[in-house]
Amino acid sequence: MSRIGKNPITIENGVSVEVSPGGRFNHLSVSVKGPKGELSEDVRKGIDVKVENDTVILERKNDSKMNKGLHGLYRSLIANMIEGVTKGFQKDLELVGVGYRAEMKGNDIELSLGLTHPVLYKTPEGIKIEVADKTEVKITGIDKHLVGQVAAAIREIRKPEPYKGKGIRYKGEQVKRKAGKAAAASE
């Protein structure tokens, strides 16, 4: 039994979970509705999802290697969906460097990162981006995967470099610094 998959998921107040046949894999589709929105996930064959009382229970049909992996995966995905529609998810980014700044242009974000031109990042649907300070960006949404993907895409525009540490980094991220040529030559 999967250690993660065997744990039941408790459904919080104000959240409804529906399991219906069908979906992309012709097996089951799980939809979660809550105060912040609605999410759905299609479940592959080999995993059964049951809603009993105020809990969601996942069971696998057999102990094949594929089903063992999917058991824990779908349990985590459904638990994240329930947490997302109640609390939501957030990622914070910092812009480090002289002249590095961000500003909102409608729903999109414009980044000035020392490149020849400012970069405009279009915000996907379901994501909210806020610029608290000119150098701090806050990404929020109900889909954990999408929030992380947007944060990674913005960070990818200008990753932190190891010599001066300039670039976009996650809040609290430690950047390993390298010694420059002058420091290496003096040894």
Image: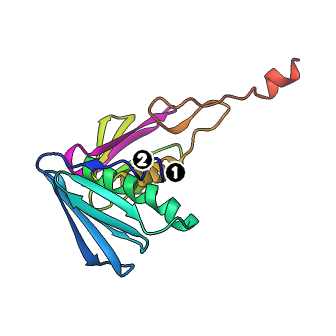
Question: Compared with residue 20, is residue 95 higher up or lower down, i.e. above or below?
Answer: above
* Tags 1 and 2 touching, CB below 8 Å: yes
Residue 97 painted magenta = yes
What amino acid is labelled 1 in the image?
Ile
Based on the displayed image, in which of its 4 quarters is residue 127 positioned?
bottom left
- For the C terminus, the image quarter is top right
Q: Is residue 26 left or right of residue 117?
A: left
Residue at horizontal 47 percent and vertical 47 percent from the top? 3
Near-viewer residue (182 or 91) = 91
Residue 90 painted magenta = yes
Q: Is residue 86 left or right of residue 172?
A: left
Of marks 1 and 2, the one in the foreground: 1
Q: CA distance from mark 1 to mark 2?
A: 9 Å
Q: Is residue 81 left or right of residue 187?
A: left
Q: Is residue 54 left or right of residue 117?
A: left
Query: x, y (%) of residue 139?
Result: 33, 45
Outermost residue to the top:
187
Total numbered labels: 2
Based on the displayed image, in which of its 4 quarters is residue 64 positioned?
bottom right
Residue 123 seen in render: no
Provide the residue designation for mark 2.
Answer: 111
- State the SS at label 1: helix
Query: x, y (%) of residue 155?
Result: 49, 46
Residue at horizontal 46 percent and vertical 36 percent from the top? 95
Provide the residue designation for mark 1.
Answer: 157
Based on the displayed image, in which of its 4 quarters is residue 66 positioned?
bottom right
Question: Compared with residue 123, is residue 187 higher up or lower down, i.e. above or below?
Answer: above
Outermost residue to the left:
14
Return the disc, 1 or 2, that comes first in the chain's sequence.
2
Region of the chain picked out in magenta, as a range: 84-106
What amino acid is labelled 2 in the image?
Leu
